[in-house]
Amino acid sequence: MSQPMEDRVARAMAHLKAAEEAAASARAELDTASATARSADRSVRVSVGAKGELTSLEFLDGKYRTMAAAQLSAAVLEAANTARAEMARRVVDLLDPITRMTARGAAPERMGVDWESLFGSLIAETSVAKGPTAMSRLRDEIVEDEDEEDDKGRQGGA
């Protein structure tokens, strides 16, 4: 009767060791991970680390010199959010199998990770497949506002 218990303990220990190794590997990968994104207008490039922290911000081709402050701000936010969303997806892809591995044998609904609560709507809102994001709509509105101001300036000067 002790043999089945010993087998179960041995299987549990092997499972624990595999989970620990997977977690250590994931941590090592995340320690060096980064994601980079450009704004849609190609004026800004942003890189973020595994925790979503900004690690690099570049203004490309001198385009920032001719941009209104609000337009440049929108470009920076758009690129940062896109990079953060890419990194969040990579973190989920890397860690979700590990959380599922450690939840085996327990009640999975209590042991799983609620990625939505961790990352909010960041992953879903900035998905490339979903179309325009809040940031791209803001950028479009800023550009439209500038076009309207230019039209008013031309009309007033004519």
Image (spheres, rainbow, N blue to C red):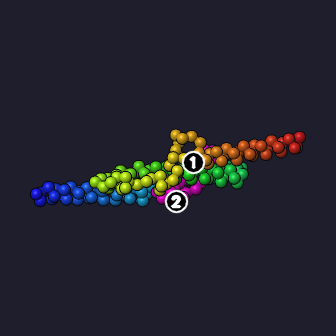
Quadrant where the C terminus is found in the figure:
top right
Q: Is 124 left or right of 26, judged from the image as shown?
A: right
Disc 2 residue crowd, few under 14, some 14–19, many 20+, Cα 10 Å: few
For the magenta stretch, what is the residue range?
39-58
Amino acid type indicated by mark 1: Arg
Locate residue 64, reporting x and y percent: 67, 51
Residue topped by disc 1: 38
Is 26 in the magenta?
no
Q: Is 51 left or right of 68, judged from the image as shown?
A: left
Amino acid type indicated by mark 2: Glu
Q: Is residue 156 above or below residue 4?
A: above
Is 41 in the magenta?
yes
Instruction: Tell me the number on the disc at residue 53.
Output: 2
Distance of mark 1 from mark 2, alpha carbons?
Answer: 16 Å
Residue for point 80% across, 41% down: 151
Q: How many marks?
A: 2
Residue for point 65% across, 47% down: 138
First in sequence: mark 1 vs mark 2: 1
Locate residue 50, reporting x and y percent: 46, 57
